[in-house]
Amino acid sequence: MDPAELDRSLQQLRSSHLRLSPRLNLDFSHWSNILNHPSYLTKYLTQSTRSPLKIAELVSSIGTELDRGWQTIESFINSSKLQSEYNFRSNIRQVMNQKIYRGIPLETPAQIQTAIEQLYRAQTELPLPTQVNGVEDLCLLIDKSTNETIRWKAIEYLWIIDPDHPKLPLRFIRDLGIKFATDSLALMISELPMSGAHCAILLRVYPVNREMYLPAGVKLSIFDEDGAPVLISAGNPFEAISRNDPQDSYIQLYFVAEESDRFGINVILGEQQFTEYFNCIVVRINYLL
């Protein structure tokens, strides 16, 4: 492909109303040519990170369907489109209604008490309450713990036990348009404020509708504002990939970012891809409204 054609492809991506997967805005042959020309790929990543979507924009548009397709998870599940097209058979609804978290039952008061006691014993900052009070003890962990793993587990428990509790962070979700079998993939994002100028981010990929499990090979990853993949120990990419055995009902990543950080999210299944860019700034203000 000549440079003029590559420039036209970049212009098409730049002018797209929705910053969806490049694969959805371009013919695959055109997108493939950009991938094969590093200088043009760098231009694309640079232009895409200039105006990242602030999570605050999602918060300010609660109750409406956003231009970029984001909704609160409650609106998404209860939307008339989802109900009419999929006959209420939403996998996400089923997952949310389950009174269990990764094998830990949270249905009866005794089960809830046991789970909370185990969560307190897994950290050292706060003493085990002399009398476990369920929701109050989870809120204390969310407010006081500096261990983000513990805080997210407390939130997960609270989402199951009392999903409408005001302490819970909002969850936003969108259908990615990535198809498999008779289903598609959805991306969820949630943010948890921290002390100082940091925030904790939770990402999840679900099957939207009939399928209870993701197909094998769905990859969720993040990259920095320069388009470079975020690496963990030994130079390995920070990513989650769905398995074939056992199958996954969702995959997730969580990480800590500064409130002014820009980051990208990438979801890939085969040749299908979704990319979105975010800015963590001013999230805390909106979380407290």
Image (cartoon, rainbow, N blue to C red):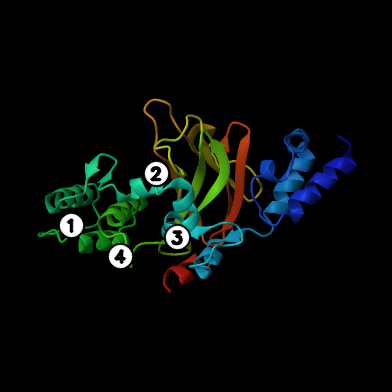
Answer few, some or many: residues within 10 Å of disc 1's Cα (few below 14, many 20 plus, some between 14 and 19). few
Label 1 vs 3, first from the N-terminus? 3
Which element is circle 1 on?
loop
**CA neighbours of label 4 inside 10 A, class few (<14), some (14 to 19), many (20+):** few
Residue type beneath disc 3: Ser
Q: Is residue 124 above or below residue 260?
A: above
Q: Is residue 148 visible?
A: yes
Residue pointed to by mark 3? 75
Mark 2 vs mark 4: in front: 2
The span from disc 2 to disc 3 (Cα, nearest Å) is 15 Å
Could you tell me how far apart the alpha carbons at marks 3 and 4 are, in whole angstroms? 17 Å
3D distance between C-alphas at marks 1 and 4? 23 Å
Q: Is residue 146 left or right of residue 78?
A: left
Mark-to-mark CA distance, 2 and 4: 23 Å
The residue that mark 4 highlights is 165
- Sequence-first disc among 2 and 1: 2
User: Farthest residue in the left direction?
Assistant: 130
Of callouts 2 and 3, the N-terminal one: 3
Which residue is denoted by mark 2 in the rendering?
91
The amino acid sitting under disc 4 is: His
Q: Estimate the spatial distance between the alpha carbons at disc 2 and disc 1, rounded to whole Å.
A: 37 Å
User: What's the mark number on residue 177?
Assistant: none
Front-most of 116 and 188? 188
Q: Is residue 201 shown to the viewer in this render?
A: no
Residue found at x 76% / y 55%: 15
Place of residue 223 in the rendered image (x, y in percent of width and height, measured from the top left): 59, 45
- Image depth: mark 3 or mark 4 in front: 3
Mark 1 or mark 4, which is nearer to you? 4
Q: Are marks 3 and 4 in contact (CB under 8 Å)?
A: no
